[in-house]
Image (cartoon, grey):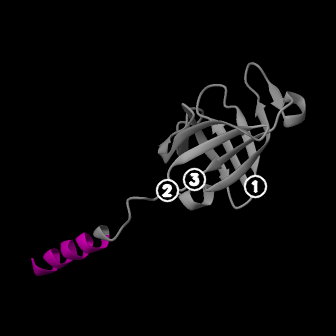
Amino acid sequence: MRKLFLSFTALFLLTSFYSLDTTKVNNSTILNTWIWEKSVCGGKNPYVATPKTIGFTKKIIFTPDGRVITYKNNVEIRISPYKIEKGIGYIDQSEHDLITFEGKTYVIENLDNQNLTIVSNNQDAARTIFKR
């Protein structure tokens, strides 16, 4: 009985130190300025859009206070909140890191010091690629 009690106590202590925030995305990694490189959609209306083909540049800045500032041709056009959380991806029904901003939710497909790739979390699965 004493061994069982010690086992439960050890289990309780170990689980109390386990972080519930197991997201792979480090919120500080996304902070800073991201320049739009291209968007690709392979759904029913396939397209590739770049600043050259669309005729404008776009950049977004994620701030430490949970805001994203959007610029078009270096003119600020919008400030909105953003949120990063775990959720289910529409396409594969698997758990992913999701980011929501400007009224849309995206799967974070790639995030490192130089690259950010997000995929619309809906049936069109448009992929947008940003660089630092």
Residue 109 in the image: above or below residue 13: above
Residue at mark 1 to residue at mark 3: CA–CA distance: 14 Å
Residue at the (54%, 44%) spot, across then down:
98
Quick one: label 1 or label 3, which is nearer the N terminus? 3
Report x, y in % for residue 58: 76, 39
Residue at mark 2 to residue at mark 3: CA–CA distance: 19 Å
Depth check, mark 2 against mark 1: the one in front is: 1
Q: Which amino acid, mark 2?
A: Thr
Q: Which amino acid, mark 3?
A: Thr
Q: Which mark is residue 90?
A: none
In the picture, residue 51 is in which quadrant? top right
Q: Which amino acid, mark 1?
A: Arg
Report x, y in % for residue 123: 62, 25
Residue at the (38%, 59%) spot, across then down:
20
Quick one: label 2 or label 1, which is nearer the N terminus? 2
Q: State which region is magenta.
A: 1-14
Residue at the far front in the pictured view: 75
Query: Could you say whether the residue bearing mark 1 is in a helix, strand or loop?
Result: loop
Q: Front-most of 5 and 46?
A: 46
Depth check, mark 1 against mark 3: the one in front is: 3
Query: Could you say whether the residue bearing mark 2 is in a helix, strand or loop?
Result: loop
Q: Which residue is identified by label 3?
A: 63
Answer yes or no: is residue 101 visible.
Answer: yes
Question: Counting other residues with Cα less than 10 Å from the Cα at mark 3, is it few (<14), some (14-19), or many (20 or more)?
Answer: some
Query: Could you say whether the residue bearing mark 3 is in a helix, strand or loop?
Result: loop
Q: Is residue 16 left or right of residue 54?
A: left
Q: Which residue is identified by label 1?
A: 132
Q: Which residue is identified by label 2?
A: 23
Quick one: label 2 or label 3, which is nearer the N terminus? 2
Question: Counting other residues with Cα less than 10 Å from the Cα at mark 2, is it few (<14), some (14-19), or many (20 or more)?
Answer: some
- Magenta-drawn stretch contains 88: no
Residue at mark 2 to residue at mark 1: CA–CA distance: 22 Å
